[in-house]
Image (tube, rainbow, N blue to C red):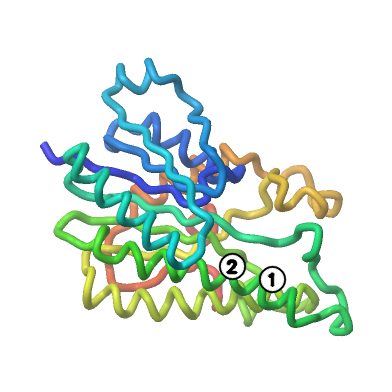
Amino acid sequence: MAKSAAIIIGASSGLGSAICEQWQRDATIDAVIAISRKNIKYKISVKEARDNSKILHSIQCDYTESAIKNCCEQVDELMQRYRLDNVTRVCICNGILHNDDVWPEKRIEEVNSKMLLEVFSINAVIPVLWLKALLNIVKGDTECIMTVFNARIGSISDNRSGGWYSYRASKAALNMLLKTAAIEYARRAKNVKLISFHPGTTDTPLSKPFQHSIDADSLFTAGFVAKHLVDLMNLKHADGELSFIDWEDKPIAW
């Protein structure tokens, strides 16, 4: 029987960790490869993993272009070492909204080139570098569903309130990069389905400073979002198209 792997990029984030935990207990996945800037602590014990014949492996990566290339070479080596036949799931969930130097702009006077470039690099450039590096790993005869975390705020037609220049623009740019990649993947990796995924407002450090304006019913746990995403990925099939959807599998206008 063929053995499959799932790859999670940004595995130390709140959502990345929750998805990793879902996959660790998924009987259809034989190996979970977790990639992050930090060391990963798996939510299940080594004993539980062994009892379920689950292969768990973590790789540290600083997300530079050369490091991403090197990381994918390590993934390829792991596939051979553990005799894994294919990759059936990939999640790319790294991103930035704020840090000590970055904050969503309320007015155009707050826009500056340094912040724009940093946000674009993390939210748009790095995900497409992963799609570039993973192409030869995911293409094959077995269906592979790839999800890249995005946000509804990246919808141009849905922008009615303005503000958040860097974040909005980086997410809109990500959608264009994903759409272009989906067209090429449809030619070169017909087995792959690409998803641009809006998780909703999730209770993680990313959204923490902005949760005061969110209704309790609209603030989701990372586990809730991860479960919904894993379930909807299981229902998707390669169709040569990019789907821009939310956690309920509802399409989002471009």
Residue that numbered label 2 is attached to: 123
Above or below, 95 relative to 177: above
Using residue 145 as the reference point, say whether residue 195 is left or right of it: right
Residue at the image point whose x is 33% and y is 62% from the top: 134
Percent x, y of residue 72: 34, 56
Above or below, 3 relative to 188: above
Residue at the image point whose x is 71% and y is 52% from the top: 206
Percent x, y of residue 51: 30, 17
- What amino acid type is highlighted by mark number 1? Tyr
Residue at the image point whose x is 35% and y is 23% from the top: 49
Q: Quadrant of the C terminus?
A: bottom right
Using residue 12 as the reference point, say whether residue 136 is left or right of it: left
Splitting the image into 4 quarters, where does residue 105 fall?
A: bottom right
User: Which residue ends up furthest to the left in the rendered image?
Assistant: 1
Of mark 1 and mark 2, the one earlier in the sequence is: 2
Above or below, 237 relative to 57: below
**Residue 167: which disc?**
1
Q: Residues within 10 Å of mark 2 (few under 14, many from 20)?
A: many
Are circles 1 and 2 on residues that touch, CB within 8 Å? yes
